[in-house]
């Protein structure tokens, strides 16, 4: 099942003096819904365009199905792309658009028509064949672009920011539709996006990129719970970051000395030299908030006095299902805390200006070395 | 600024008065006079009387007269000119569109450079090339002599090519003059085209040539039509180029009009010829309008 279909081998791409993609090695397996995620200008689109054949790598090799396609022109690659602007040909009918690729491959007219109709059915546009693209909504045009790419039965379907041009409601519907479509056709999907929610919700695996470098390749939950760098921790979801020095590093526990949050106790060892600077990243929903009492609360998996911070509630955002608090701790840093509103009175537990204790478990912080 | 003219009618008319005056006094009125001439007759040497006669128009369509032939010939030369402008101009426009941004400005400047040179000078420059002792024939002579030396004199004596005073020279000259008018509208359409359409075509398995004919040419339709129109109309009415580069049988309609107004001193007939030319232009513009309406109807 884990048959590698795409392989980037030490691929770099430079445009003049700027390096868009910097020595990326990456393997994508057959049947995956893979997402390339990162801020704009991180090189994710360049990586996708190199896969489609619109850009040639400056260095390295790109393999599709074990065959080196680094210098193969786009029209000879077994991949098809759904463009961000959809790029539906405005002067052709919907059916002609979908059949275009088959026509270029020399498929006979009758078969072309049947397969195009079938592809339109797949994206729920049956009966729209005779229309012109300007008679369609944005969402429908995107379906045409999808059908046009899928009708060629590519080994890999490339999607460049597929949902960015849709309105919020349609975007949510399209998310689940794309995932179920991928499961139905069984083709490997590679999607470029800058939207972390989109990537987490749709992809089976994500690659996070920054400044041309591959930061981390992992499943969505691993990216969120086990980020490998401050960049990934910060880019995926929101996070509270505490800088400190690694004080104790034993196989079964470690202690980070921080100025902002006091000593942080971890229930696992850290593979790092003691004395080096490290960061503890704690997600807002993993922080508990308590009424301020004289004795600080004790965290059950850490010794007394660890993983507890005194603070004052400064901001409060009520979101219905949950509330987001910003708590100021010594030194002026604001800590984000998310509390689910489990009962109908939970949001009244804390008010702005209230003194509180914050605590988190020894298993909660992710330790980052860079 | 968002205020429509309906909200400021006084201002609108005040602004419009001067140009309207100009248009009426210096364009519509003279044009109307010429139009009336075309229904008039000569009386004596300088007087023209409006008699409402159709004889001037009848004279044009009289098959024993050369005028209809000259119209047909003018149409043919203008069509050839437009065709060559399109065939030569399209690749140039395409090249400018896909040139790197820095080169683009320079290439466009090169296309527009002829506009800053007087037409007469450009035509004389062309004559310097085409003359019997012009640059083309001189080069040809040198090459001929070299070939003849190799062939041991079997090629005979050198005969210069007859390039000047031919229909060929007229079409060449008109292409030379009108090419920028074709390139610029083509470029402006091609430059606005969404590049991802081309990439999509390549991605779907089309080659470059196939993409050109399936995507680029249809997408450039509006530019092609307006390029054809603004090349064809001036070419049809051109006067200087056939006069200077053409031979005795290369007369175009504008040359005949000129001779009617001057040498033949037959203003009514010259006026009738002019208006036939104007009507032909109208037909051209109407066809473009229809094509555009069809286009707009399709995209509504």
Image (cartoon, grey):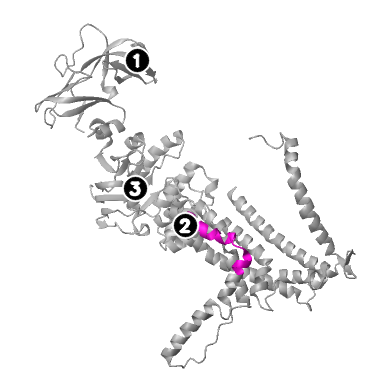
Would residue B190 be found to the left or right of residue A42 on screen? right
Instruction: Identify the residue under disc 3.
Output: A46
Q: Is residue A357 above or below residue A158?
A: above
Read off the residue under disc 1.
Answer: A314
Mark 1 vs mark 3, CA separation in Å:
43 Å
- Which mark's residue is nearer the viewer, 2 or 3? 3
Residue A99 position by quadrant: bottom left
Asked whether residue A315 is drawn in magenta, I would say: no
What chain does mark 2 sit on? A
Give the percent coordinates (x, y) of residue B299.
58, 49
What residue appears at the point 76 percent right and 47 percent down from the top-left corner? B20
Give the camera-side residue of A46 and B142.
B142
* Cα gap from disc 2 to disc 3, whole angstroms: 34 Å
Which residue: 51% across, 60% down? B110
Q: Residue at x 75, y 36 (%)?
A: B10
Q: Nearer the viewer, mark 1 or mark 2?
A: 1
Task: Point out the stretch of residues depicted in magenta.
Answer: B105-123
Instruction: Indicate the secondary structure of the residue bearing disc 2.
Output: helix
Residues at marks 1 and 2, CA–CA distance in whole angstroms:
64 Å
How many C-alpha atoms fall within 10 Å of the one at disc 3: few (<14), some, or many (≥20)? Answer: many
What numbered label is drawn on residue A113? 2
Question: Could you say where residue A88 lies in the image, as x and y percent from the top left?
Answer: 47, 50
Task: Please give the name of the residue rendered at 48% of the width and 91% of the height, measured from the top-left corner.
Answer: B155
On whether residue B116 falls in the magenta region, the answer is: yes
């Amino acid at each position: 099942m884990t048959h590698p279909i795409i392989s980037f081998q030490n691929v770099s791409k430079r445009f003049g003096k700027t390096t868009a993609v910097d020595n990326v090695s990456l393997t994508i397996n057959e049947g995956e819904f893979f997402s390339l995620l990162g801020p704009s200008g991180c090189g994710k689109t360049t990586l996708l365009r190199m896969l489609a054949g619109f850009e040639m790598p400056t260095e390295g090799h790109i393999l599709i199905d074990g065959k080196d396609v680094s210098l193969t022109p786009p029209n000879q690659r077994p991949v098809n792309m759904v463009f961000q602007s959809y790029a539906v040909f405005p002067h052709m009918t919907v059916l002609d658009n979908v059949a275009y690729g088959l026509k270029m491959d020399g498929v006979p007219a009758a078969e072309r028509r049947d397969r195009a109709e079938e592809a339109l059915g797949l994206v729920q546009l049956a009966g729209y064949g005779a229309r012109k693209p300007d008679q369609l909504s944005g969402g429908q045009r995107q379906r045409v672009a999808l059908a046009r790419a899928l009708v060629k039965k590519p080994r890999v379907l490339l999607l460049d920011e597929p949902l960015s041009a849709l309105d919020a409601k349609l975007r949510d519907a399209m998310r689940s539709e794309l995932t179920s479509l991928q499961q139905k056709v069984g083709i490997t999907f590679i999607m470029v996006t800058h939207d972390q929610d989109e990537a987490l919700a749709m992809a089976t695996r994500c690659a996070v990129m920054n400044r041309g470098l591959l930061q981390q390749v992992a499943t969505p939950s691993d990216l969120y719970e086990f980020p490998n760098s401050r960049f990934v921790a910060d880019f995926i979801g929101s996070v509270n970051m505490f800088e400190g020095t690694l004080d104790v590093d034993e196989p079964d526990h470690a202690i980070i000395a921080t100025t902002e949050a006091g000593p942080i106790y971890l229930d696992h060892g850290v593979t790092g030299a003691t004395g080096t600077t490290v960061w503890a990243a704690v997600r807002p929903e993993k922080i508990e908030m308590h009424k301020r009492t004289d004795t600080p609360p004790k965290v059950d998996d850490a010794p007394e006095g660890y993983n507890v911070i005194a603070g004052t509630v400064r901001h409060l955002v009520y979101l219905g299902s949950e509330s987001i608090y910003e708590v100021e701790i010594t030194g002026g840093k604001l800590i984000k805390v998310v509390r689910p509103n489990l009962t109908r009175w939970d949001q009244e537990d804390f008010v702005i200006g209230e003194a509180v204790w914050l605590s988190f478990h020894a298993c909660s912080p992710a330790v980052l070395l860079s | 600024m968002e205020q429509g003219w309906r909200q400021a009618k006084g201002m609108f008319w005040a602004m419009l008065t001067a140009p309207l005056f100009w248009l009426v006094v210096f364009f519509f009125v003279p044009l109307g006079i010429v139009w009336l001439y075309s229904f008039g007759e000569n009386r004596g040497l300088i007087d023209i009387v409006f008699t409402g006669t159709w004889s001037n128009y009848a004279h044009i369509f009289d098959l024993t007269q050369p005028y209809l032939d000259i119209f047909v010939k003018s149409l043919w030369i203008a069509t050839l000119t437009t065709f060559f402008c399109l065939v030569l101009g399209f690749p140039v426009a395409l090249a400018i569109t896909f040139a790197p941004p820095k080169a683009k400005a320079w290439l466009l400047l090169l296309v527009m450079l002829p506009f800053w040179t007087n037409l007469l000078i450009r035509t004389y420059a062309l004559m310097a090339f085409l003359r019997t002792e012009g640059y083309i024939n001189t080069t040809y002579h040198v090459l001929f002599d070299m070939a003849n030396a190799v062939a041991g004199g079997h090629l005979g004596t050198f005969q210069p090519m007859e390039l000047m005073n031919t229909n060929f020279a007229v079409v060449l000259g008109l292409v030379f003059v009108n090419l920028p008018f074709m390139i610029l509208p083509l470029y402006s359409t091609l430059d606005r085209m969404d590049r991802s359409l081309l990439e999509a075509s390549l991605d779907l398995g089309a080659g470059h040539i196939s993409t050109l004919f399936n995507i680029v040419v249809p997408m450039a339709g509006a530019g092609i039509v307006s390029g054809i129109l603004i090349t064809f109309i001036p070419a049809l009415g051109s006067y200087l180029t056939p006069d200077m580069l053409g031979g005795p049988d290369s007369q175009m309609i504008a040359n005949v009009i000129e001779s009617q107004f001057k040498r033949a001193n037959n203003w009514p007939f010259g006026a009738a010829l002019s208006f036939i030319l104007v009507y032909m232009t109208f037909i051209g513009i109407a066809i473009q309008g229809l094509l555009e309406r069809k286009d707009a109807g399709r995209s509504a």
